[in-house]
Image (cartoon, helix red, strand yellow):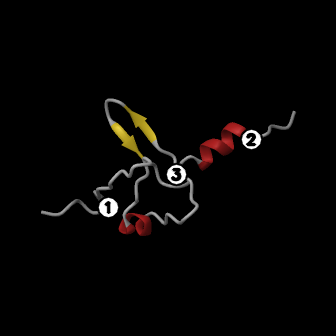
């Protein structure tokens, strides 16, 4: 039985400096390139989440948009 379409699971090992390597397949699927910044969200009762790149772009645009007076 495979995962439902569009759902994935990977494992990553945390190195001595606290760094993780994002698996190649994940980098390809989500177009993650060297130098990209990723937002990591965490909740003690739910774990960590890394939203897709650009997920908050519209929110930031609205929040920091300069309004004409």
Residue located 46% across and 49% down the image: 51
Q: Mark 2: which secondary structure?
A: loop
- Image coordinates of residue 16 in percent, x first then y, are 39, 49
Residue bearing mark 2:
65
Q: Which mark is residue 18?
A: none
Q: Quadrant of residue 69?
A: top right
Q: Which mark is residue 38?
A: 3
Q: Mark 3: which secondary structure?
A: loop
Name the residue nearer the viewer: 19 or 54: 19
Q: Residues within 10 Å of mark 3 (few under 14, many from 20)?
A: few
Mark sitting earlier along the chain (2/1): 1
- Image coordinates of residue 58 in percent, x first then y, are 61, 47
Q: Residues within 10 Å of mark 1 (few under 14, many from 20)?
A: few
Q: CA distance from mark 1 to mark 3?
A: 20 Å
Name the residue nearer the viewer: 34 or 66: 34
Residue bearing mark 1:
6
- Say if 57 sits above or below 34 in the image: above
Residue located 53% across and 66% down the image: 33
Q: Quadrant of residue 29?
A: bottom left
Mark sitting earlier along the chain (2/3): 3
């Amino acid at each position: 039985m495979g995962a439902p379409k569009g759902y994935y699971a990977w494992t990553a090992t945390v190195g001595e400096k606290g760094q993780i390597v994002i698996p190649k397949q994940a980098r390809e699927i989500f177009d993650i390139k060297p130098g990209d910044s990723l937002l990591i969200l965490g909740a003690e009762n739910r774990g960590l989440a890394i939203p897709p790149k650009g997920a908050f772009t519209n929110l930031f645009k609205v929040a920091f948009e300069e309004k004409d007076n």
